[in-house]
Image (spheres, rainbow, N blue to C red):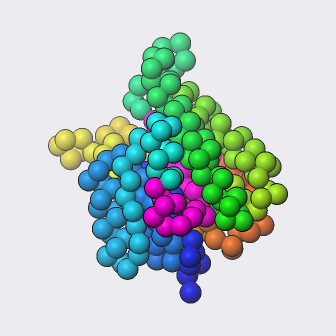
Amino acid sequence: MGKLDGKVAFITGAGAGIAKAAALTFAREGARIAIIELNAEAGAQTEAAVAAQGGQGLFIKTDVTDPAQMQAAVERTVARFGGLNVIMNCAGGSTQRDFPVHEMDLANWHHTIALNLLHPFLSCQYGIPHLMKAGGGSIINFASSLGMVGSVKPAYAAAKGGIVAFTRTLAAQYAQHGIRANAIAPGVVRSERQLGRWEDPNGEKTPARLAYDNLKKLYPFSVSEPSEIAALALFLASDDSRMMTGATVSADGGKSAYLKVAP
């Protein structure tokens, strides 16, 4: 018997990285998966991967920053699977134009906030009524180690710091409905996007990769695999974590602790 037997999970960004790993992990534990992804090829690949291991997945091409598309994605999920039990808001990311505040382009600020903070709000706004109808459920948001310490990326840090406060608020507002809300704050994850930053077109290490190599020498657990974060998400989605709500779980291998004590 799987830890998520009979459950329906709505996972954003499930075409790659942590969210794809979570979709496969949750499916192996018995959940039916709504694969919310803008990249059609990536979303279809995740749907096929879920099916290949005997699970049920539904890819829904969605711009997670668009309210109408998010509402439609939730409604399509419920229509297909009959309900909703888990919301995992994993889509997100920063840009190379996340400059210091006095140099910040306003359009980049709005895009980063929409992708990382507005989209979880939309998932919850349209999804929570279905969690309530189901008698409860689990919400898993994604913060970041950069939302927990000072950062050179003000828009991304502001959005991820906002996720921490938003998660606590969800926990307080919906506990009476049996809904738990927690957040995960990863550090560096060896995802497809990150790997793309680590090698230049000639296959050489980039400055970003060299910086992380140096960090890993100091903190050998500072780079995680998507499957490791997915395992934590499974814990938060399942009844194993029934006493946890309103928490932000740091999963950065000690990176944020190191930054707090570094000279």
Quick one: quadrant of the N terminus? bottom right
> Whole-percent x and y of residue 105?
45, 17
User: Left or right: 205 with respect to 256?
Assistant: left
Quick one: quadrant of the C terminus? top right
Q: Please give the name of the residue rendered at 53% of the width and 40% of the height, measured from the top-left corner.
A: 119
> Whole-percent x and y of residue 29?
52, 77
Q: Is residue 70 above or below residue 135?
A: above
Q: Most extreme residue toward the bottom, as rendered?
A: 1
Residue 124 counted in the magenta span: no
Name which quarter of the figure residue 163 lies in: top right
Q: Please give the name of the residue rendered at 71% of the width and 40% of the height, measured from the top-left corner.
A: 165
Q: Is residue 139 above or below residue 50?
A: above
Q: 228 or 206: nearer the eye?
A: 228
Bounds of the magenta segment: 76-94
> Whole-percent x and y of residue 194?
38, 47
Q: Please give the name of the residue rendered at 57% of the width and 42% of the height, measured from the top-left corner.
A: 122
Q: Most extreme residue toward the left, as rendered?
A: 202
> Whole-percent x and y of residue 159?
59, 34
Name which quarter of the figure residue 180 lies in: bottom right
Residue 85 counted in the magenta span: yes
User: Left or right: 158 with respect to 32?
Assistant: right
Residue 129 visible in image = yes
Q: How many marks?
A: 0
Q: Most extreme residue toward the top, as rendered?
A: 102
User: Left or right: 123 with respect to 58?
Assistant: right
Q: Please give the name of the residue rendered at 23% of the width and 45% of the height, measured from the top-left corner.
A: 204
Residue 18 visible in image = no
